[in-house]
Image: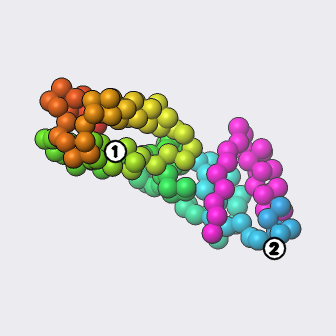
């Protein structure tokens, strides 16, 4: 199963894109399923079996594609990162947190860059993998985690 993520500036362009995608995939013997949109008008024009979620007032409704959650009603992407609340960290644990930040579309580029620069500083400090971070650096990491 593959997903296609796209967008359009208006309903007519979205309908045209929807039709073109269906035709292109149909010519290869594939059927496109599960449309999702932040537009009730576009969803209502699709057959009900093709719509992944009906339009309603549910604010927690989200669609997950490429490991990223999208909330159609708010038209925003949501990233969830669970970080263990600890009093001390090692270089290994910092790298583990950074490696869990999945960002295939590059939305978190500035956050990941800051995290990688922080990790670079740990290397410059010549810390071993399991050395506890010095107090000042640990404080900076805590601030990074909470923002």
Q: Quadrant of residue 144?
A: top left
Nearest the camera: 20 or 119? Answer: 119
**Is residue 9 one of those drawn in magenta?**
yes
Task: Count residues near mark 1 (Cα–Cα under 10 Å), then give few for <14, some for 14-19, many for 20+.
Answer: some
Is residue 31 part of the magenta span, yes or no? no
Question: Which numbered disc, 2 or 1, marks the residue closer to the eye?
Answer: 1
Counting labels gives 2
State the residue at coordinates (71%, 42%): 8
For the residue pair 98 and 49, the one nearer the viewer reads as: 98
| Residue 40 in view | no
Residue 51, above or below 81: below
In what element is the residue under mark 1?
helix
- Magenta range is 1-23
Q: Nearer the viewer, residue 103 or 133?
A: 133
Per the image, the residue denoted by label 1 is 95
User: Residue 58 in the image: x percent, y percent?
Assistant: 43, 54
23 displayed left or right of 143: right
Q: Residue at 77% x, 50% y: name it.
A: 17
57 sits left or right of 43 in the view:
left
Judge whether 81 appears above or below 141 on screen: below
């Amino acid at each position: 199963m593959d997903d296609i993520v796209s967008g359009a500036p208006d309903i007519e362009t979205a309908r045209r894109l929807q039709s073109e995608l269906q035709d292109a995939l149909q010519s290869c013997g594939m059927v496109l399923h599960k449309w999702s949109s932040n537009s009730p008008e576009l969803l209502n024009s699709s057959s009900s079996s093709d719509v992944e979620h009906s339009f309603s007032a549910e604010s927690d409704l989200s669609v997950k594609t490429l490991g990223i959650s999208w909330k159609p009603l708010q038209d925003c992407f949501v990233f969830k990162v669970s970080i263990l609340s600890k009093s001390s960290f090692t270089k290994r644990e910092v790298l583990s947190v950074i490696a869990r930040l999945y960002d295939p579309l590059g939305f978190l580029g500035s956050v990941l860059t800051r995290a990688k620069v922080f990790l670079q500083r740990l290397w410059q400090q010549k810390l071993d993998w399991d050395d506890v971070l010095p107090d000042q650096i640990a404080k900076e990491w805590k601030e990074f985690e909470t923002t």
